[in-house]
Image (spheres, rainbow, N blue to C red):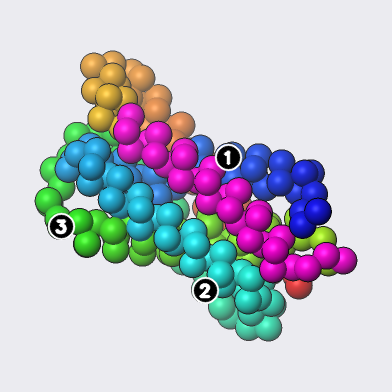
Amino acid sequence: MLVSWAAVLGVALVELGMALTPGPNMVHLAARSIGQGTRAGLVALAGTAVGFVVYLVASSFGLAALFAAVPAAFTVVKIAGAVYLGYLAWQMLRPGGHSVFDPAEVTTIRPLRLFGMGLVTNLLNPKIALLYAAILPQFIDPTLPVWPQFLVLGAVQTVIGVAVNCLVVVSAGRLAGFLRARPLAMRLQRVLSGTVLGAFAVKLAFERQPST
């Protein structure tokens, strides 16, 4: 067997928990879907999916080993990610802050750029960088061929991540309408999401260097 069922289940649970946590991908896809329509959100989601594949390929060639060999690379990703997530949290928690489901005017952009924005957002997503560099390698059995394991576990992560984000895209408009009609629920959602993002930013800031 290329990979154990325990590893598959472990990666699936980790990815499900991370995908359900508000982050750059969710914020971007929800905003684009609400502001420009479901079709635009799905195009951006396609770019996000390609970003997962890029991380999978990079990991198979030793992303964790690169971070271990060049500690500054990991530090840059860690600090940049923590600052970005902290900024998103502040935008929600500050006085007069806004939720990802608040109505907002967005500039209508072409499909190719939508795809590119989804790709770049995912490539710069610190949650995904750390998932592939520090978490996924923990489920790899060194006594078995590494590449097939990365392929299978990366496919599990990608399928779950894309599925959850697809639900965000197709339901964002309806959920936004539901929350706008209920100001208290909107406020609670904003505070909860901002708190989760802030907590993840703090956790990320103190994340230890992944080992090979």
Crowding at label 1, few (<14), some or many (≥20) Cα neighbours within 10 Å? some
Q: Which numbered circle lies on residue 76?
A: 2
Q: Residue at x 25, y 30 (%)?
A: 173
Query: Disc 2 residue type?
Result: Val
Residue 163, magenta (yes or no): yes
The total number of labels drawn is 3
Give the mark toward the camera: 3 or 1: 3
Q: Nearer the viewer, residue 26 or 179?
A: 26
Q: Check disc 3: other Cα within 10 Å, few if <14, some if 14-19, many if 20+.
A: few
Q: Which residue is mark 1?
A: 16
| Residue extent of the magenta highlight | 143-171
Can you tell which quarter of the image residue 139 is in?
A: bottom right
Q: Which residue lies at the image location 61% right of the left edge and 69% below the top edge? A: 59
Q: Which residue is mark 3?
A: 110
- Give the vertical position of 120 relative to 156 (above or below): below
Residue at the far right in the pictured view: 143
Image point 68% across, 83% down: which residue? 69
Q: Say what secondary structure mark 3 lies in.
A: loop
